[in-house]
Image (cartoon, rainbow, N blue to C red):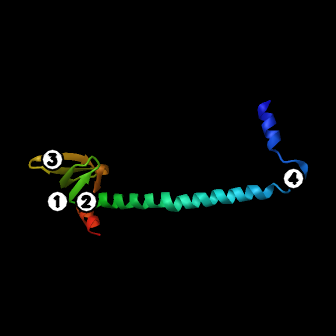
Amino acid sequence: MNLLFLFLSMAPAGGEAGKGGGGSSTFLIMMLLIFVVMYFFMIRPQQKKQKELNKFRNSLQSGQKVITAGGIYGVIKEVKETSVLVEVDSNVTLRIDKSMVVKDPSDLSQQAHK
């Protein structure tokens, strides 16, 4: 009963049917505008950052210094399809999934000098 009352109270009266159309189009335009703003300020930059990270991971080479997602610094000794062998100290190597390699330490020093 309450749901029926809610729908009936939201329906425009007979004389107001022509006037109510403008409000809904304004609402749709505002929602579209909000989505466009969110796309350009949130979604698009994230997609760009993800592409750059994938490009970095695909270009990993032996001898390259890297930092993992866990904060481990090391030098790549071997690159495979889905993993890399990282030397973190003398005679200490770790096999790490490529998706956990996040940055190159030389990028950090370049950003610090800007």
Tag 2 near tag 1, CB within 8 Å: no
Where residue 8 sits: x, y (%)? 83, 40
Amino acid found under the numbered disc labelled 2: Asp
User: Can residue 77 be seen here?
Assistant: no
Q: Nearer the viewer, residue 86 or 67?
A: 67
Position of 74 relative to 37 (above/below) = above
Decide which of tag 4 and tag 1 comes sooner along the chain.
Answer: 4
Residue 4 horizontal/vertical position (percent): 80, 35
Q: Earlier in the sequence, mark 1 or mark 3?
A: 1
Q: Is residue 98 above or below residue 51?
A: above
Q: Residue furthest bottom?
A: 114
Residue 104 circle label: 2
What residue would you read off at disc 3? 93
In 3D space, how far apart are the residues under numbered discs 2 and 4 (Cα atoms)?
A: 64 Å
Q: Which mark is residue 75?
A: none
Instruction: Give the camera-side residue of 30 and 52.
Output: 30
Residue 63: numbered disc: 1
Give, as a three-letter code, the residue at label 1.
Gly
